[in-house]
Amino acid sequence: MKRSSRLSIALHALVHLHAQPDKQLSSAALATCLMTNPVVVRRILGELREADIVEASKGPNGGWTLSRPATEITLRDVYAALGERMLLRTESDPGDTTCAIVRSVDRVMHDFLNDAEALLAARLQRVRLSDLATEALHAGFPRLD
Amino acid sequence: MKRSSRLSIALHALVHLHAQPDKQLSSAALATCLMTNPVVVRRILGELREADIVEASKGPNGGWTLSRPATEITLRDVYAALGERMLLRTESDPGDTTCAIVRSVDRVMHDFLNDAEALLAARLQRVRLSDLATEALHAGFPRLD
DNA sequence: GTTTCATGGAACTTTTATTGTTACATATAG
DNA sequence: CTATATGTAACAATAAAAGTTCCATGAAAC
């Protein structure tokens, strides 16, 4: 494993798509840039497609494009589309029924995490893909051919 | 793996210690209740010991006790003592220098996560071990012999 | 229509992190 | 001295995530 995560791969790919709105970037091209495998790219972007964030077209010169303007894509959208949790869950063994404390600890932690999750989602919603792209472009990024 | 986590094991153990302040509970006794291994208990409580949350004594009738009142132990203390992250990190391969976008994405995410981490810590600080124990005891928990 | 190049998706392997286990040294009460 | 506890290191097992291979399918170019 390269210590990447699906979210960072997704965001990286989306910035590339936004930077080259006229092109359809193939999974293979993206994979080269993201230093990963084309199938991994397809898996991740496939989930974003179901959330109407990207579109794919087959055949020669086919590939991926954004299906909405980058100003209308928030990090929360991407996060939700991936079905990921940013918070580590701390649940116990479901088969652990010996001790009632377990359930209490789990419940308190569960409530806390739900709260926290909502908090994070609200913050993620404030960041748009276009913001991220501006950041990236400002730092001077190398165009893809 | 049983899908437990160090934090939930730690909290579970601490509630037990709080519930029986007169006893020194051994790693083996706790392990039975937590459905895990004595060495795992020692590893986790060992980290809490370094943060002055628990104390251990050796020899017959030795074991673990809280080193402070449960009202003075917050979940943040426990969380910090374990050196855990509640947030999933989304960093990329450190060797990935091909594309400058990676660094930008990483930086934005890193800033965001630091913010979020502080937010969570503040919330964790508001929950005391005694609160958790009250919850657990209210649900009716089985005493250990 | 056929060729080419792309996605779609299943099945499998590899890698990484975490947890569990064994073994043994050390300390302490009785 | 002995029994019982922690402390720690080294190793094994397990589960999650990512990477890989393979082939079916669809769409564009010729």
Image (spheres, coloured by chain):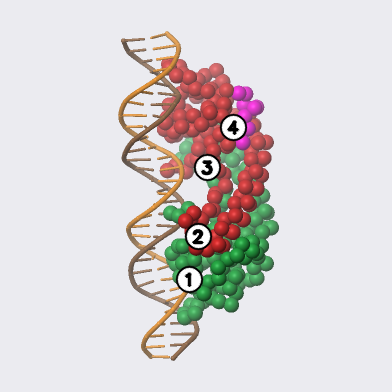
Chain colours: A green, B red, C orange, D brown
* Residue on which the image places disc 3: A91
Give the residue type that dot 3 points to. Answer: Glu
Whether residue B134 is visible: no
Indicate the secondary structure of the residue bearing disc 1: helix
Q: What stretch is highlighted in magenta?
A: B68-76
* Residue on which the image places disc 4: B136
Q: Which mark is residue A134?
A: none
Residue at the spot 51% in from the left edge and 35% down from the top edge: B9
Real-space CA distance between mark 4 and mark 3, rounded to the nearest whole angstrom: 15 Å
User: Image quadrant of residue A125?
Assistant: bottom right
* Residue on which the image places disc 2: B97
Where's residue A24, x and y in %?
A: 54, 76
Q: Residue A29 carries which label?
A: 1
Give the residue type that dot 4 points to. Answer: Ala
Q: In this view, does B125 lie to the left or right of A9?
A: right
Q: Which of A15 and A103 is in front in this view?
A: A15
Q: Nearer the viewer, residue B112 or D3?
A: B112
Indicate the secondary structure of the residue bearing disc 2: loop
